[in-house]
Image: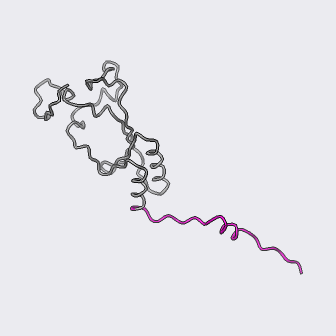
């Protein structure tokens, strides 16, 4: 693998862009998730991120859970060690729109539970305050019946 950053337009006929890449596409996977609409949705996202080695990003109004981790077949030279038997998703992936020369930015990127919660506070209406148990007990207790 070359360490020279080559532009797509400078590739020679038959040359493969992967020869100049660090296999960005093999170092994580991302799954689409529902767009959060309420406090519970954001709380679930906080839970995802609390498990480490993941993030949530938004790209063109679509939300994704990104799980970091190198493919177990990724070789030190950034090539596939399972090329002949790779999954269909790898076979159909092309370098036409790959991340080789993109800037790695997203519309929104959340890497900590605190970032998710801060964003939720900014975009959602305030949460309803829960009553304290002592208040609930007072309201739920019936008055004694007095027989006269």
Q: Residue at x 22, y 41 (%)?
A: 102
Q: Quadrant of the N terminus?
A: top left
Residue in the foreground of this view, choosing between 84 and 104: 104
Rendered location of residue 125, percent (x, y): 44, 65
Q: Is residue 28 above or below residue 37?
A: above
User: Is 127 on the left-hand or right-hand side of 89?
Assistant: right
- Asked where in the image residue 138 lies, by quadrant, the reply is bottom right
Q: Quadrant of the C terminus?
A: bottom right
Q: Is residue 54 above or below residue 12?
A: below
Residue in the foreground of this view, choosing between 24 and 62: 24
Q: Is residue 124 above or below residue 22?
A: below
Rendered location of residue 111, percent (x, y): 37, 47
First to last magenta residue range: 122-148
Q: Would residue 108 be counted in the magenta stretch?
A: no
User: Is 134 on the left-hand or right-hand side of 36?
Assistant: right
Q: Would residue 126 be counted in the magenta stretch?
A: yes
Residue in the foreground of this view, choosing between 42 and 91: 42
Rendered location of residue 127, percent (x, y): 50, 64
């Amino acid at each position: 693998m070359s360490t020279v950053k080559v532009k797509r337009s400078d590739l020679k006929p038959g040359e493969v862009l992967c020869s100049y890449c660090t296999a960005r596409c093999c170092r994580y996977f991302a799954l689409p998730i529902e767009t959060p609409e309420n406090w519970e949705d954001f709380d679930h996202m906080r839970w995802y991120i609390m498990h480490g080695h993941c993030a949530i990003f938004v790209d063109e109004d679509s939300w994704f859970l990104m799980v970091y981790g190198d493919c177990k077949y990724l070789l030190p030279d950034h090539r596939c060690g399972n090329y002949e038997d790779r999954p269909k998703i790898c076979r159909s992936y092309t370098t036409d729109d790959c991340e080789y020369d993109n800037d790695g930015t997203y519309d929104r990127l959340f890497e900590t539970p605190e970032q998710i919660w801060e964003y939720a506070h900014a975009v959602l209406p305030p949460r309803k305050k829960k009553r304290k148990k002592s208040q609930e007990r007072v309201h739920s207790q019936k008055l004694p019946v007095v027989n006269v």
